[in-house]
Image: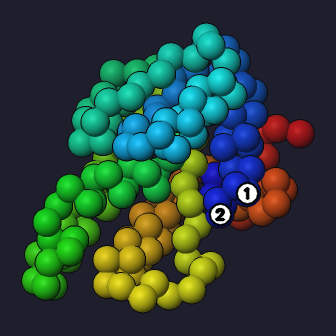
Amino acid sequence: VLGGARSGKSRLAQELALTLGGQDVNYLATAEVTDPEMEKRIELHRQDRPQSWKTWEGHPSRLADDIAGMNGTCLLDCMTVWLSRLSLADPAVEGDDEQAWQEAEAAVRSEAKRIVENARSLDSLIIVSNEVGFSLVPPYRLGRRFRDLQGRVNQDLASLADGVALVVAGLPLWLKGASPVS
């Protein structure tokens, strides 16, 4: 489920999770509390989902391994936060060594694909991700690298997905597959 900030992508993803998994859903939360504003955002997300859902709040580097042991329906919200936490931990992201950056990018893309591969035993995996390519070109290299990496990861994941929705103004446009919710 792709979309911009405040597009309604998380709401659609939760509707999908309720339809596919009911009250038995593994919610994979990738954000971490870094300041009071982020703490409020996380709390709003917690209040927004059913209390019966099991919440995973582990480190991004463990997600692919941890998801392999889960079953049922999983909702990963969101890939963009996962990607930023994982990629920003690598010094190559801000460095001048282009080869090191390409290797770091390849490793992150491989890990994102591994999440999907390790989720094959699940009934369903729903991934929320930001579409960051509709905006201006970032004026700094780090911003451009992240935007490009996010776009490539979104392409990788969409190629593996049965269905892909782009959410704009709360309205989903199904780019691949059909909506499992009416």
x and y percentages locating residue 116 in the rendered image: 41, 44
Question: Which amino acid lies under the numbered mark 2 shown in the image of this protein?
Answer: Gly
Q: In the visual, does 120 lie left or right of 8?
A: left
Q: Are marks 1 and 2 in contact (CB under 8 Å)?
A: yes
Q: Residue at x 67, y 18 (%)?
A: 50
Q: How many marks?
A: 2
Asked which quadrant contains residue 49, the reply is top right
- Determine the residue located farthest toward the top in the rendered image: 52
Q: Which residue is disc 2 drawn over?
A: 4
The reply to whether residue 85 is in sight is yes
- Determine the residue located farthest toward the right in the rendered image: 182
Q: Which residue is disc 1 drawn over?
A: 7
Residue 2 sits above or below residue 143 on the image: above
68 or 140, which lies in front?
A: 140
Residue 21 sits above or below residue 97 on the image: above
Residue 68 sits above or below residue 35 on the image: above
Work out which quarter of the rendered image holds the C terminus and state it: top right
Q: Residue at x 32, y 30 (%)?
A: 58
At numbered mark 2, what does the secondary structure look like: helix, strand or loop?
loop
x and y percentages locating residue 61 in the rendered image: 24, 42
Question: Which amino acid lies under the numbered mark 1 shown in the image of this protein?
Answer: Ser
